[in-house]
Image (spheres, rainbow, N blue to C red):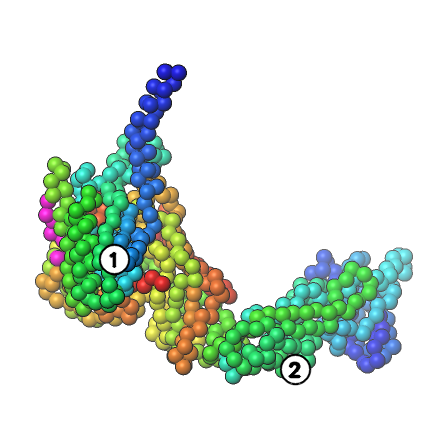
Amino acid sequence: MGNGGTKPTQAAFAILYNQGTQKYQLEQTLQPDEQMWIDIGKLIREHIPDKNGKALPADLTSGSYEIRDLTNKFIGALFEGKVIYDKTYGHVSYGCGSCCGFKLSPLWYDPLGVPFLGTSGNGMNSLDTCSGLWEDVSDSTYGNWSTANTGIATVDYYATHTGRSIGSTTSSTFAMLLAASRKPTCPVQYFGGSGGTNVQPCATPATETTAVQGIEATTFTQFVQTVFDTAGDNFNGQTVEEGNAASGQDTCWFQGSTVDKYTGMTGGSWTVDGGQVSGQPNAWGFDVVGWSAAAITYYRAQAPAHGIAIPCGLTGYQSMQIQCHNGTWWTYTPSVGNKLTATIEQTDVINCRYDMNNSACQTINY
Amino acid sequence: MRFLLIAFVIVLSNVYAHPQDAIQVRHSKYIDHAEVRHLANSATITANDARPLAQALTALSEEYAWVVDFEDPPYYSTYDLVDDTDAKWRAAHPTAKGVTAIAGDSFQSQFAENPDTGTSVADEERILQKVTSDYNESTNPGKFSVRNEGDGRFAVVGTQVKDEHGQYQSVNPILDTPVSIQEETRSAFKTIEIILDALTVKSQTKVSLGMFAQNALFQSQVTIGGQGIPARVLLQRTLSAAKVKLCWRLYYDHDVQMYMLNVRPLMKAN
């Protein structure tokens, strides 16, 4: 392989063997027009160690290889040449590999929350089709960002958004990246990305994760939630409150039941880093989900004869809002809300909380 | 032709002969929510449920943001209860006892409405009295009375049920039972559990906590207690300490001979 660019570049060569589970890696700086010659037969015969001190097995007869431009991550300058495998046995393979390019280009945050007269950063990822990993390609988007309504939000060269007035708009950007290709060529393609930008009265959580804390009153699950935003703001001391994103469902209830029909959230509120989670920054809780022990016993005994099969359960759709320091409220969950479920089985109850960014369940033997 | 007509008449006459058909017909008439309809100077409320008065009170509570508690009387006779056993379950359990449901169905009431309705406690009491009175005049199970519990809180309490001869019989509302609990600071949830445990022991009737506003009751700390105080009063004091307005529904199931206390937040309709 060689450097077809006009500047020196760091070239990486790797041989993958044992069904791709093992990797032999070499690295070398190539000057413009300089080439890197690799005799794999010699590497095997002479047990030449790679950059990590690993040698190729003496009985190695097949494998694949990849080359990577480490200096120019998104649009490489390397070109591939013929690879000599082993002249002794007549096996010769010509370089005609497919290009390790990118596909898909989502923004880091969609929608991006931006506090009024405050700032929030965004970026873009893209999927490396060889490694299968998402790469941060934000460097390639710098200078390409724009917003649809600059009265609501503006964005600078480095994708830092500034809230100009409360409302919603769209942010867009693009990057020129090597596209995934089966052909020996590596085409450079336009990768665009766009997403919503919401300017809010204050910093609001962009993500919320949930975790099981423990059991309350035998059959309920205590969940603790942690909130974050792009700027790493501190929400401690602020109040969060639940509401209904949609009507709740109750598949255990029957006409005449002594247990009230579940219809939705009951309006709990919590102080971030306060109450039962005091001392846990940016955490709120406990959010308690489940059925009372008496309700579980009642439904197991009575519901089947009324035509209700066990398992049965309740489902609620919880919207969450946070109170800004100026007293205004802002809903930070998506319109569908968080899904909370509690299922009565014959010998267990299963309480789950499906949050914005993850979910957690607890099975209680009762 | 005559044979066909006779057969058709026989089939029609037997439409409701099978208990399962009667159950399905009854269930199909029930509505999810009672409806409040506003007229020029009055309003009507229409309910259809196993507990139509409770359904009507829930709708009024949501319409006007009223805190209204409800308490079933202990129904037990075939005049107040109907068979509610599922056909498939019955087929699988041919010798089992089966289950019943309260025999309520449709109910409608009309009351005068003015601009103060919803904000005036006197108006609230007048309307609750009118609706409860209309209910007591209907053929629905039980008779109820309205109690002003103070501080803008009302309770509609079951006071009579029919006996096995179809005659009305007075009952003592179970929440009037005096109980004693240690005065301590506990969560509202724990306090209610202790009140209900004491009530169960004193009344010899199981009373448990069913559906409730979990976060409100688990988070609220209350200091409640006393000797020989009606369970109703202790419950009112406990709920008053919560951050949100709460009311209760105390429902009775004759099949298991127990009450379930449900505590719900006040939800104002939009």
Q: Which residue is mark 1?
A: B42
Q: Quadrant of residue A70?
A: bottom right
Can residue A90 be seen in this snapshot? yes
Q: Looking at the picture, how far across and down is residue A63, in whole percent?
A: 78, 59
Residue B171 is one of the magenta-drawn residues: yes
Looking at numbered disc 1 in the image, what kind of residue is underneath it? Answer: Ser
Tally the numbered discs: 2
Q: Residues within 10 Å of mark 1 (few under 14, many from 20)?
A: few
Residue A119 badge: none
- For the magenta stretch, what is the residue range? B169-176
Q: Residues within 10 Å of mark 2 (few under 14, many from 20)?
A: few
Q: Nearer the viewer, residue A219 or A102?
A: A102
Chain of the residue on which disc 2 is drawn: A
The residue drawn where x is 20% and y is 54% is B131
Q: Nearer the viewer, residue B270 or A314?
A: B270
Q: Which residue is mark 2?
A: A157
Q: Looking at the picture, how far across and down is residue A90, in whole percent?
A: 90, 57
Horizontally, is B111 left or right of A23 in the view?
left
Can residue A47 be seen in this snapshot? no
Give the structural element (helix, strand or loop) at label 2: loop
The residue drawn where x is 12% and y is 57% is B176
Q: Residue furthest top?
A: B2
Chain of the residue on which disc 1 is drawn: B
Q: Nearer the viewer, residue B19 or A99?
A: B19
The residue drawn where x is 29% and y is 57% is B39
Looking at numbered disc 2 in the image, what kind of residue is underneath it? Answer: Tyr
Q: Residue furthest bottom?
A: A117
Residue A301 is one of the magenta-drawn residues: no
Q: Looking at the picture, how far across and down is residue A9, in whole percent?
A: 79, 78
Image marks 1 and 2: residues in contact by CB distance under 8 Å = no
Q: Quadrant of residue A285?
A: bottom left
